[in-house]
Image (spheres, rainbow, N blue to C red):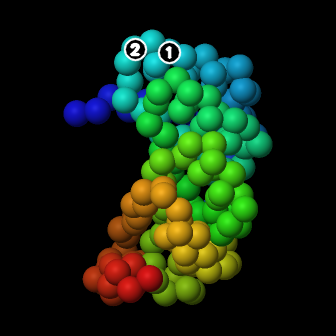
Amino acid sequence: MANIGYIQMVRHCNQNCGFCSNPETPWFHGEPEVRAIIDDFARRDYFGVIFTGGEPTLTPILAATIAYARAKGLHTRMISNGQKLADADYLRSLEEAGLQHVHISVHSHIEALEDFLTGAPGSLRWAKEALTNLATSAIRVDVNIVINRYNVDQLHETIAWFETH
């Protein structure tokens, strides 16, 4: 099993999922702190690092951090809601920095339900755009779905939706 470290870049988010286990705070890592953590992962021969949050795309140091991790030989992953990845130029900047794998969180193919679950109207549209942008990149993509009482009955339809999109 690969040894992968996690770095929680920020504790805030641009969505408000009712099931989120990360309490929002204005706290964030600075670049020297993140570099020290990455140096520690590299020194201990970790396979890679997963950048998380809150929403990791909300830190202005994400691309530089990804590039630093790649320079240290680490595989780079990120867990994101995809909202900022709907911007093709922003996604390209992360890919150029060395991002290799993204886990996009989408919880329903039904727009109103996704809006309800994320507390962010338009979240499904952003996720679709992010997935479209990722399809033209070399970045590997996985989808995270939090199964709950609101979406469990449509899970098979949501999976089918992902297969066609």
The 10 Å Cα crowd at callout 1, few under 14, some 14 to 19, many 20 or more, is: few
Q: Amino acid at mark 1?
A: Asp
Residue at the spot 45% in from the left edge and 51% down from the top edge: 101
User: Residue 65, position in %: x, y?
Assistant: 64, 34
- Per the image, the residue denoted by label 1 is 40
Point 56% across, 27% down: residue = 71
Residue sitting at the far top: 43
Q: Which dot marks residue 44?
A: 2
In the image, which disc is placed on residue 22? Answer: none
Residue 41 visible to an observer of this rendering: yes
Q: CA distance from mark 1 to mark 2?
A: 6 Å
- Residue 132's place in the image compared with 50, above or below, is below
Task: Name the image quarter holding the C terminus.
Answer: bottom left
In percent of the image, x 37 and y 70: which residue is there?
148
From the top left corner, tell me how far across and down residue 33 is, in percent: 66, 21
Looking at the rendered image, the quarter that the N terminus falls into is top left
Label pair 1/2, CB-CB below 8 angstroms:
yes
**What's the amino acid at mark 2?**
Arg
